[in-house]
Amino acid sequence: MSALAALVRAYARMEARGELPPFGYSHQRIGFLISLHADGTVAGKPIDLRIGTGRKKTSRLLTVPQPAKRTSGIAPNFLWDKTAYVLGVTASEAKRTAQEHCAFRDQHHAWLDDSHDEGLRALLRFLDRWRPEQFSERGWSAEMLDQNVVFALESERPLSIFLHDRSAARAAWTRLMDGGDKADTICLLSGERGPLARLHPAIKGVTGAQSSGASIVSFNLDAFTSYGHQQGANAPISEAAAFAYGTALNRLLDRGSGHRLQIGDATSVFWAEAATPAAATTAELIFAGLLNADDNTEFSRVGAILEQVAEGRPIGALDLGLPAGVRFHVLGLAPNAARLSLRFYVEDDFDVIAERYLQHLQRLRISPPPREPTPSLRRYLIETAVLRKGENISPHLAGDWLRAILTGTHYPLTLLSALITRLRADHDVNALRVGLMKAILIQNFRMEVPVALDPDCTNKGYLLGRLFAVYEHIQTAALGRNVNSTIKDKFYGAASAQPPKVFRILDNGSSNHLSKIGKQRLGHRAHLENAVGSIMEAMSPGDDPFPAILSEKEQAMFSLGYYHQRNEFFRKTGSGVPEIAA
């Protein structure tokens, strides 16, 4: 099933539950109501529909006829619009406000002149009498400017019946949607015959895309067309299906929807398909919690799962508490000029996707662990960015990484390169970076990588990293921590990439440092010398222990060995002497 077809199915389920408007309608933020008498005169001042007080007022969400798709042209909405169209007034000077108001009036005459409905005739009479100057003459509130406005008959206002809710208005809107010279087509998404969608809905809420919305399906250049077809005819989708996928996707992209995930430049949405709404909701909550538990309402439940993973419990032993057959969908979107790119689409059983993600968490396990109990994906990606700024995360990296996690395939190698570049630049070898490199080594290179310090690991990169950490500790023990620059500050980048250039210098320098330590703590000196000797012995001196160049995966092992050995010095034995694994 394609992503758009899956969204059409999702719309059908949400519309049946009353979460989404029917075909041809949409949820829009409406600020004010103008109540009319049957003769078209205004019944008092406009009514503020906003919720809240003071500056925190928010427009009310109402179901209204679907708005016109506007780019640079003038296109009025049916029975509602912003004040520039409805009243010819706006908060800022605009050159075409008068044109927009005239278009609203003239278009409604064209749409409704043959109607005998009392409410629709009242609107036409109001538009014929209204002059933009009356807004200030009547003393209407400036807070109304640029808000969306709807209408109602004064007799029906107490019942909260708006003009667009009247049966005559709904019938007129249905005729307008079905009218015109619209070609029928067999829809690629639903398989049913219906009017062809010439233009597809604008999708809003994708970070980096146009605020007015961008299209997933769009044909506006000759290079995009084939066999002489125009616009939407190149990929025939019915108006109903286009409305369905656009409405469902816009709902999922709403901030606070609980279905949205922002990682780098990739805006992702997810939803579940199950036999019951409760099972789908549970799957969505678990998934949201796994990827970012801090924002999840069922943190305690997800936290328990994460704790079991951190303790190394087998994935198969975890009980997610879901029935079989829950289907899960994850769609990644990214901005691309006036369009949207589908970065990835993953569809599989929820158990399979959840297991892949939990396996990813196990690959990230490192000892000692990060300070944060459940770092988010974004928090990990920040470690690859210059100055740890989100805007500096490499394009495509976030989407490629999430797709690899959810499909169980190799991580992007650009992730490893970015980590190594940052380590060479700032020398900050922390749990997040080392955990990421460990996961890449396991997933991409099928290497056996230790979670904690492993004295038996003979990988050259790992041993060199351990040795570098011991030399650093020797310097600290001899000179204290208040030195201008440590050997890590001076030599980490070169030592992790070209060991022969550095380790001979470090070995010579350590002799002086050990001599100074021995004058004060002879036993500690012997302990450090044994640590160096045991690592050197494991390096097989006869087999070139200092290769000229370390590959990227060996540099990752270098960082892992350094991290493990350095943190081992912070463990204390009962006698208070630093413990160093041999």
Image (cartoon, rainbow, N blue to C red):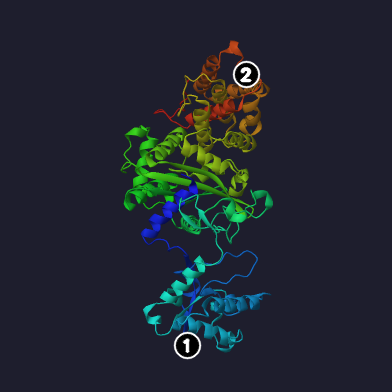
Q: Is 544 drawn above or below residue 467 in the view shown? A: above
Task: Single out the mark in the foreground, 2 or 1.
Answer: 1
Residue 145, percent across and down?
57, 77
* Quarter location, residue 347: top left
Q: Which residue is at a point 40% across and 81% down the rendered structure image?
A: 157
Three-letter amino acid code of the residue under disc 2: Phe
Pointer 2 or 1: first along the chain: 1
Viewer can see residue 420: yes
**How far apart in space, not on screen, are marks 2 and 1 (Cα)?**
88 Å
- Disc marking residue 575: none
Circles 2 and 1, Cβ within 8 Å, touching? The answer is no
Q: Is 53 drawn above or below residue 45 in the view shown? A: above
Q: Secondary structure at mark 2?
A: loop
**Number of numbered tags placed on the structure image:** 2
Mark 2 neighbour density, 10 Å: few (under 14) some (14–19) many (20 or more): many
The single residue placed furthest to the top in the displayed view is 542
Residue 195, percent across and down?
51, 59
Q: Which residue is at a point 38% across and 36% down the rendered structure image?
A: 309
Residue 485, percent across and down?
64, 35
Residue 519, percent across and down?
56, 23
Viewer can see residue 57: no
Q: Which residue is mark 2?
A: 546
Q: Secondary structure at mark 1?
A: loop
Towards the viewer: 430 or 304: 304
Q: Which residue is mark 1?
A: 44
Mark 1 neighbour density, 10 Å: few (under 14) some (14–19) many (20 or more): few
Towards the viewer: 34 or 137: 34
Q: Is 562 drawn above or below residue 295 in the view shown? A: above
Three-letter amino acid code of the residue under disc 1: Gly
